[in-house]
Image (cartoon, rainbow, N blue to C red):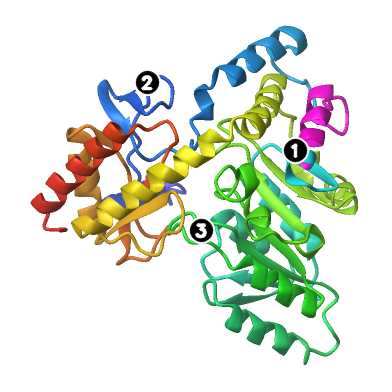
Amino acid sequence: MRNPTAFLGKEYQALVEGELDWRLRVLQGPSTPWCVVEGKKVLMLCSNNYLGLSNHPRLKEAMIKATQTHGVGSGSVRPIAGNMDLHVELERRLAKFKGAEASLVYQTGFMANSGLIPQLAPDKEDLIISDELNHGSIIDGVRLSHAERAIYKHCDTEDLERVLDETEKHKPPYRRILILTDGVFSMDGDIAPLDQIAKLGEEHGAMVYVDDAHGEGVLGEGGRGIVSHFKLDRKKVHVEMGTFSKAFGVVGGHISGSRDLINFAYNRSRTWLLSGSHPPSVAAACIAAIDVLENEPQHVKTLWNNTTYFKRTMKDLGFDTGNSQTPITPIIVGESGVAKKLSVRLYEEGVFALPIVFPMVARDRARIRTMMNAALRREDLDFAISAFEKVGKELYII
């Protein structure tokens, strides 16, 4: 008799043998610069908690207070009975922070992409154009659509223009054209040329959708993101998607844009319609995070000071940091096995930094992805750099 689940163990074992499996470590306590991972005190160098806000006293106080006043859950999806005043206030504050007409909060960033993209361009009469290195949540959103698809070379606006020019020849004309790009690409840390993408979108009558998950709290005035970074007219970037799970230090996804966009999204996006709303404590913490970004700009400045120092020093040592322009600093080593050995040895030396391997990156581009944090001190960075230098020489990386 056939074993219907035999493939599970076999495929996992194949991943292990190819050194492509994830081996989960356990964080025991908060995500702080120095934390405890499986009983060992280590320096955290792989968290997306860019500004250290996940432990900010104002966020913790807001969560506690909201739990006392609103309970631990909403008890429903938002369209029915789970639309609390804290959710509405969060969206009002977020739209103001972003300089947009309106915002909508999703349960996760992944759900924002997978739920909204297939609704914006759902049918075979539509076309979706995507950067070849876009995030997996964008890819899954595209797969849920029946639209035709085109890929342009990574951050190559000449190739994007070629694709758009070809659309002009399509008969009948496409009903809708949607251009999708990450703002900051999470594996390499480079920034999309959104100013040029928006210009091409305007010239060809295409919607422009940017996933700015790694740009919020990092780029732009006071951490307002990539649209602010390029000083773009908001009407030329139709959907600015983001997340509270990284620089904001909490959890959840969101979109910002026109009031028409938001009305459309919460009526058509099933991931929003059919998922329970955020616990009130989370909504309150997100509001507090916006307050901190508006009133404590030093966090963003410190993040960039740390980034500049770490990136420059690692390059001087001979490490390959790729084309990163942001606090995401990959240490590219090539083979998956080498990346895993580097991660293990760093952990033994007191640095927590995980390997990124295929299929998240190309087979010959395995790496340790380091993430800078505003809460890291100069002595913390020097500790990490010293560990990288020691182990890098051991493994003949430098």
Q: Give the prevailing secondary structure in the magenta stretch.
A: helix
Q: Which residues are magenta?
A: 78-95
Q: Is residue 21 visible?
A: no
Q: Residue at x 20, y 60 (%)?
A: 318
Give me the disc on residue 28.
Answer: 2
Instruction: Name the quarter where the C terminus is drawn.
Output: bottom left
Q: Secondary structure at mark 3?
A: loop
Q: Residue furthest left?
A: 394
Residue carrying label 3? 185
> Residue 106, relative to residue 295: is it above or below?
below
Q: CA distance from mark 3 to mark 1?
A: 23 Å
Q: Which residue type does callout 3 highlight? A: Phe
Q: Residue furthest bottom?
A: 169
Q: Which residue type does callout 2 highlight? A: Gln
| Residue 361, x across and y down, in percent | 40, 61
Total marks in image: 3
Q: Earlier in the sequence, mark 1 or mark 2?
A: 2
